[in-house]
Structure formats: C-alpha cells, structure tokens
C-alpha cells in the first residue's frame, strides 16, 4: 500500500498543496474533514455515532465475537490478552490511515486524469483500486498486491471458519453427545469431524456471500456501510446478553434466548428497507451505529427481565436454615 501511494503521487504529478486544495474544495464537501459534529441520525460516521454506536459495536466485536476472542484465549494471562487487544488496535490505526490516503489519492487521480479504465462498463467505486492495480502498477508489484489482497482475505476467512467449527463442536456436538451418554470422541475422530464441519460452513458462507452481494447492490449502500450493518444483526443481541452477564447478576437462559431473538428482530424492523415500508419516506432510517444502539438496548432490557440461577429466591432464603 505504501508503494501504491508513491505510484499515485507520481501519476498525479501535482504539488501537495494543489492536491490538498482539490480535497478540501470537493463538491461533496471537505474530504480532509476528520470530525463531523452533526447530530444527523442518518449519518453513520459522526462524532456522536462513533462515541456511542461504534463503542458498543467494538465491545460486541471484542467481547462476544468468537473470531476475535479465540485469539485472546491463546495469550498466557488475561493481562497479556488485554495488551494484545490494545496493541492490535493501535497498530491498526496507521494501516487504516494508509488506506484512507490511497482512497483520497485515487479520487484526486480521477479528477486529474479521468476515470480509471473508462472503457470498462458500469464504472463502480468498489472496483477503483483494483482497476488502478491493473492499469498503473508495474507488473511485479501488480502481482504482489493481488497476492496481498488474497492473503488479507484468507487471514480473516480461515479464522472465521475455525471459530465456527470450534463453536459447533464445543458448544453443540460435545454436549449433545454427553446428554446421550455416548463416550467422547478421540482426538483423531474429532479432528476429522471438525474438518468436515469447516467444509460445510465454507459452503454456507459462500452462499451467504453471493446473496449478500445481490443484497448490497439492491440496497445502494457502500461496501463498508453494508458490511458493518450486516454485523449488527448478530452483535445487537449478543451485546445485550454480554452486558447483562458482565454488569448485573440477572438474566436466565430463557431471557438470554429472548434477548438474542429480540436484538435480531429489532434490527430487522429498523433496517432501511423495512423502515421505509412502515414509516414512509418522511422519516429517514437510522444509520447502522444507531440501529446497533437501539437494538442492543432492547436486548439488554429483555435479558435483565430474567432471574439469574445464582440468585437466591425468597423461598430458598427462608427454608435454608431448616433444610
């Protein structure tokens, strides 16, 4: 990505001051503006949406997502796991900044020299960087960047498949086998079973990805907005249950299940496409950070309604001395 910045700067061939002027006077607004203090509930990246919605989103991601928690479980102590999370975020900041710089320079490149690969039909913002790689990157560097894109995709995909397979085996199949009174599988048997489950999950994820591609095209959202919005469907209910267990001594299996279902249903109910059906066009739908906030709050309240099994009931307190 660093090399892509140098290639873009060389191709644009303008002083940094002129590039900055183009970015600050763009038709869509100042592209170098870092903080948006507006209170518009339809914007996903305002300061308030970040402080509230994205904070909840990150708590759900690092606190409930098996894809991330399995990495923390490899640390020797909770303290080292905490530092691993902190350092991974800090190291991610310059990477995100680098991607943002590339995106800004790609926009400037199109303003100066016109669309990248204009002969291709249906020029799409989603493919600008890939088309830049095909057109302007040197041959060897072109292959290296494509390999890097595949490596980045695989580094996320393999951890997701591993998380799904381990959760399926540990949380579903082992308890089911134990309830039936069957002996636990040997390590070799469980390894073969896990490989088969990974293959099944891979097929299911591929089918979901194909459906999500059509969904995203129909929604008109950008890829990043769509991807984060899809994650809210699972995170809202999980966060409500997680917060109940972390902050209170309430909750029960029944209320946790109800909270998970409620979080999903609330997100569906306020999804932009559904929102327009029952609210009309007059009231604009909530951006995904606010959908996360509303749905997780509802899930939290529902999970609170259950009485924890560790709580002593009034009857047990009165009968304990005589038992």
Image (cartoon, rainbow, N blue to C red):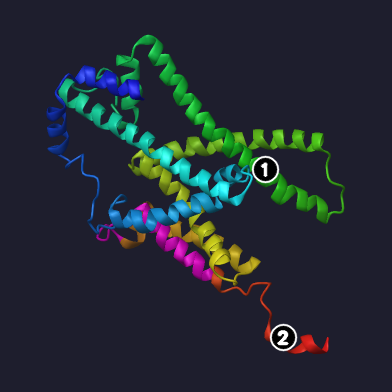
Tell me which residue sits at (49%, 30%) in the image.
Answer: 153
Tell me which residue sits at (58%, 45%) in the image.
Answer: 72
Between 83 and 128, the one lying in front of the other is 83
Q: Main secondary structure of the magenta part?
A: helix
Q: Which mark is residue 166?
A: 1
Q: Is residue 62 magenta?
A: no
Residue 239 shows in the view: yes
Residue 291 position, x and y percent, is 39, 57
Residue linked to disc 2? 317
Residue 294 position, x and y percent, is 41, 63
Q: Nearer the viewer, mark 1 or mark 2?
A: 2
Are discs 1 and 2 less than 8 Å apart at CB? no
265 relative to 312, above or below: above
Which residues make up the magenta segment? Answer: 280-302
Give the mark, 1 or 2, whose residue is nearer the N terminus: 1
Residue 145 position, x and y percent, is 41, 20
Q: Is residue 295 magenta?
A: yes
Between 98 and 128, the one lying in front of the other is 98
Image quarter of the C terminus: bottom right
Tell me which residue sits at (46%, 40%) in the image.
Answer: 212
186 relative to 69, above or below: above
The reply, left or right, for residue 134 in relation to residue 301 is: left
- Count of residue discs: 2
């Amino acid at each position: 990505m660093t090399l892509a910045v140098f290639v873009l700067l060389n191709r644009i061939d303008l002083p940094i001051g002129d590039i900055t002027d183009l970015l600050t006077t763009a038709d869509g607004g100042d592209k170098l503006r870092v903080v948006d203090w507006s209170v518009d509930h339809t914007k996903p990246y305002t300061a308030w949406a970040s402080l509230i919605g994205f904070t909840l989103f990150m708590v759900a991601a690092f606190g409930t997502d098996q894809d991330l928690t399995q990495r923390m479980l490899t640390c020797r102590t909770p303290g080292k796991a905490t530092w691993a999370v902190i350092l991974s975020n800090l190291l991610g900041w310059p990477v995100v900044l680098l991607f943002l710089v590339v995106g800004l320079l790609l926009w400037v490149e199109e303003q100066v020299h016109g669309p990248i690969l204009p002969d291709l039909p249906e020029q799409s913002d989603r493919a600008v960087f890939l088309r830049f790689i095909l057109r302007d990157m040197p041959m060897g560097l072109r292959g290296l960047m494509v390999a890097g894109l595949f490596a980045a995709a695989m580094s996320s995909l393999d951890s997701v498949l591993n998380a799904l397979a381990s959760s399926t085996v540990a949380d579903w199949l082992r308890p089911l086998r134990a309830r039936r009174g069957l002996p636990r599988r040997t390590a070799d048997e469980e390894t073969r079973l896990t490989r088969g489950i990974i293959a099944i999950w891979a097929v299911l994820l591929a089918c979901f990805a194909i459906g999500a591609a059509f969904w995203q095209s129909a929604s008109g959202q950008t890829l990043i907005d769509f991807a984060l919005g899809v994650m809210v469907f699972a995170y809202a209910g999980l966060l409500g249950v997680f917060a109940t267990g972390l902050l209170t001594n309430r909750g029960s299996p029944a209320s946790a299940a109800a909270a998970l279902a409620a979080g999903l249903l609330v997100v569906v109910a306020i999804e932009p496409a559904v929102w327009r059906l029952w609210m009309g066009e007059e009231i604009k739908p909530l951006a995904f950070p606010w959908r996360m906030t509303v749905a997780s709050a509802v899930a939290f309240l529902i999970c609170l309604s259950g009485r924890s099994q560790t709580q002593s009931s009034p009857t047990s307190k009165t009968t304990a001395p005589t038992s």
